């Protein structure tokens, strides 16, 4: 097992790090990815910990076999139950209780709501399949939940697991530095995020909306909410439908935007 971060730094607080365990045939894939940027800093600060378990370490024959031909025939190979279950059970022994999640295109689509739900736990275990998938008996009896990151097929579950790790761990308190940040992002309130601008105020003739440089915070917040609504209506009709009926304030914002044609 690869332990990226043993425990929290003693000079922060007594809170235990959010524990992520990844069961994968390619430990280095995960180890390298989580060591950079915001996740890397969170690991160094002891806010999260990442542990990797390789099912191949639990294979019992001298070739360390983790896959076999499917019963009934067909293309590809299937991950064997013995080493995979042994890896899952080793994870459970070391981490206590937290859900075992299989990364699968047949799982429930990952959403911001699910990411927030998982971030409130003490940790998660992510199982990465490979080849044609895993033995169905493992799925039925050792998996608590299945999550998909989209309607497409990957060569393995590792990229999907990394997406889940990023989406969940960034919501762990302290990881982003400013705990208010996640509350102001796309999907946090059912809308897409409003547009962002930075210096220079005029770039090749394209100017920042005057309202953002006005210093009038109430008007800026109103503009941002309006733009979030407009962007959601334009780009994600499915999300827009879920927002209905709009509050009285949001309906007024949209009506005013449609009437005056404010800058997008």
Image (cartoon, rainbow, N blue to C red):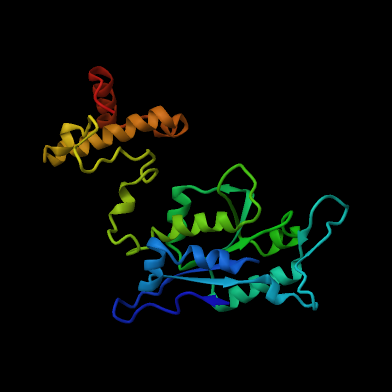
Quadrant housing residue 69: bottom right
Where does residue 217 sit, x and y in percent of width and height?
A: 14, 41
Where does residue 25 sit, x and y in percent of width and height?
A: 65, 66
Residue 71 is at least partly visible in this image: yes
Quadrant housing residue 21: bottom right
Where does residue 48 sit, x and y in percent of width and height?
A: 42, 69
**Left or right: 100, with 163 as reference point:** right
Residue closest to the eye, 121 or 231: 231
| Picture layout, residue 245 above or below residue 155 | above
Q: Hey, which residue is sitting farthest top in the picture?
A: 259
| Quadrant where the image shows the C terminus | top left
Query: Residue at 70% across / 68% down in the picture?
Result: 84
| Picture layout, residue 134 above or below residue 92 | above
| Quadrant where the image shows the N terminus | bottom right
Query: Residue at 48% across / 52% down in the picture?
Result: 114
Residue closest to the eye, 92 or 165: 165
């Amino acid at each position: 097992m690869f332990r990226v971060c043993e425990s929290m730094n003693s000079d922060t607080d007594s809170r235990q790090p959010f524990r992520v365990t990844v069961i994968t045939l390619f430990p280095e894939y995960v180890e390298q990815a989580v060591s950079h940027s915001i996740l890397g800093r969170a690991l160094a600060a002891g806010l999260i910990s990442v542990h990797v378990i390789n099912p191949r370490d639990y294979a019992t024959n001298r070739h360390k076999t983790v896959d076999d031909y499917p019963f009934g025939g067909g293309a590809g190979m299937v991950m064997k139950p013995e080493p995979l279950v042994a890896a899952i059970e080793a994870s459970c022994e070391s981490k206590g209780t937290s859900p075992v999640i299989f990364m699968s295109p047949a799982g429930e689509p990952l959403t911001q709501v699910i990411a927030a739900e998982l971030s409130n736990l003490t940790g998660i275990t992510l199982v990465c399949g490979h080849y044609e998938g895993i033995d169905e008996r493992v799925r039925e009896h050792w998996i608590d939940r299945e999550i998909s990151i989209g309607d497409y097929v990957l060569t393995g579950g590792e990229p999907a697991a990394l997406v889940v790790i990023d989406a969940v761990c960034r919501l762990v308190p302290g990881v982003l530095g400013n705990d208010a940040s996640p509350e102001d992002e796309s999907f946090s309130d059912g809308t897409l995020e409003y547009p962002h601008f930075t210096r220079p105020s005029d770039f090749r003739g394209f100017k920042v909306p005057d309202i953002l440089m006005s210093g009038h915070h109430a008007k800026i917040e109103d503009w941002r909410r309006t733009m979030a609504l407009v962007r959601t209506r334009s780009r994600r009709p499915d999300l827009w439908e879920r927002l209905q009926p709009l509050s009285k304030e949001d309906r007024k914002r949209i009506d005013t935007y449609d009437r005056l044609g404010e800058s997008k």
